[in-house]
């Protein structure tokens, strides 16, 4: 791996809001179990970074979030949808590889590790923004429709689903504390994307035509 990939790894940070959540989980349960969670998130994000490096795309920053991570790529949305799709798949592929390796480890480690990978994979493949599943859907939208209005509809649907999840998990507190906090993180993220949507629509002809 060359200097670009090493520099990308150095730019990997943990979101400040993730720390109190992780600290609370550690106080609630087994420290080693939550160390596996953090390690799994790092491996997942490394998968994205590795694919970006293989495609020659510079990673400007990677922030570890409770649901995975946020990666800023050089070129951003101007990247070809094919590259965006492959980079989005990098994290889930790394998680699957971790699941395949786990059975060869000590059984005391393998069982919780596989469980964590399955949960991480299932959460990240939910087809709503900003999860990997949502980014994969977004990339496919760019490949097959190339219409900013379709993207806007997708963001709207994601916003409605996440907002509904926040409300439902809030009503069911305290049993759903972790899911509520996770949904809240996603809700804040999608609000930011929702505010940005007007710029994508405004520059539809310029941006989308470049991706054809």
Image (cartoon, rainbow, N blue to C red):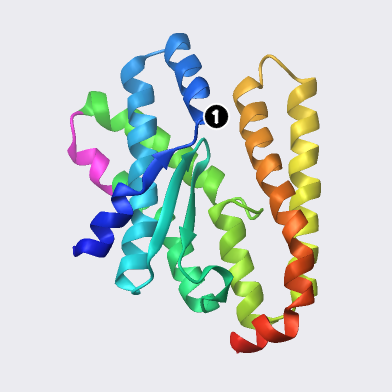
Residue located beneath label 1 in the image: 17
Horizontal side of residue 172 vs 69, given as left or right: right
Residue at the far top in the pictured view: 27
One can see residue 95 in this view = no
Looking at the rendering, which quadrant does residue 189 occupy?
A: top right
Picture mark count: 1
Q: Residue at x 69, y 85 (%)?
A: 206
One can see residue 79 in this view = yes
- Say which of 130 and 104 sits in front: 130
Count residues near mark 1 (Cα–Cα under 10 Å), then give few for <14, some for 14-19, many for 20+. few
- Say which of 209 and 28 sits in front: 209
Query: Which span is picked out in magenta?
Result: 100-106
Horizontal side of residue 175 vs 120, given as left or right: right
- Say which of 24 and 106 sits in front: 24
Looking at the rendering, which quadrant does residue 180 occupy?
A: top right
Q: Examine the rendered structure and indicate whether residue 100 appears above or below residue 183.
A: below
By secondary structure, the bulk of the magenta-drawn segment is best described as helix
Q: Examine the rendered structure and indicate whether residue 159 appears above or below residue 110.
A: below
Q: Examine the rendered structure and indicate whether residue 170 appears above or below residue 13.
A: above
Q: Residue at x 77, y 46 (%)?
A: 161
Quadrant, the C terminus? bottom right
Instruction: Indicate yes or no whether the magenta region holds residue 104.
Output: yes
Q: Examine the rendered structure and indicate whether residue 190 appears above or below residue 166.
A: below
Q: Secondary structure at mark 1?
A: loop
Quadrant, the N terminus? bottom left
Q: Position of residue 179 (x, y in %)?
A: 63, 29
Q: Residue at x 73, y 60 (%)?
A: 196
Q: Position of residue 24 (x, y in %)?
A: 50, 15
Q: Position of residue 95 (x, y in %)?
A: 37, 48
Q: Position of residue 30 (x, y in %)?
A: 37, 14
Instruction: Indicate yes or no whether the magenta region holds residue 121.
Output: no
């Amino acid at each position: 791996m060359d200097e670009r990939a090493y520099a990308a790894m150095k730019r990997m940070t943990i979101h400040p809001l993730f720390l109190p959540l992780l600290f609370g989980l550690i106080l609630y349960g087994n420290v080693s179990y939550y160390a596996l969670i953090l390690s799994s998130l790092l491996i997942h994000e490394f998968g994205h970074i590795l694919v970006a490096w293989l495609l020659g795309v510079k990673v400007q920053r990677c922030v570890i979030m409770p649901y995975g991570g946020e990666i800023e790529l050089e070129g951003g949305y101007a990247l070809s949808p094919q590259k965006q799709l492959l980079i989005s798949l990098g994290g889930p592929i790394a998680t699957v590889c971790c699941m395949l390796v786990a059975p060869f480890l000590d059984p005391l480690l393998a069982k919780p590790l596989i469980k964590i990978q399955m949960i991480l994979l299932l959460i990240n493949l939910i087809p709503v923004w900003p999860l990997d599943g949502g980014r994969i859907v977004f990339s496919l939208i760019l490949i097959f429709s190339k219409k900013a209005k379709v993207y806007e509809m997708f963001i709207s649907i994601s916003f409605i689903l996440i907002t509904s999840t926040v409300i439902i998990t809030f009503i069911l507190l305290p049993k759903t504390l972790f899911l509520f906090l996770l949904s809240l993180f996603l809700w804040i993220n999608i609000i930011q994307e929702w505010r940005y949507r007007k710029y994508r629509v405004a520059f539809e002809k310029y941006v989308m035509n470049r991706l054809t």
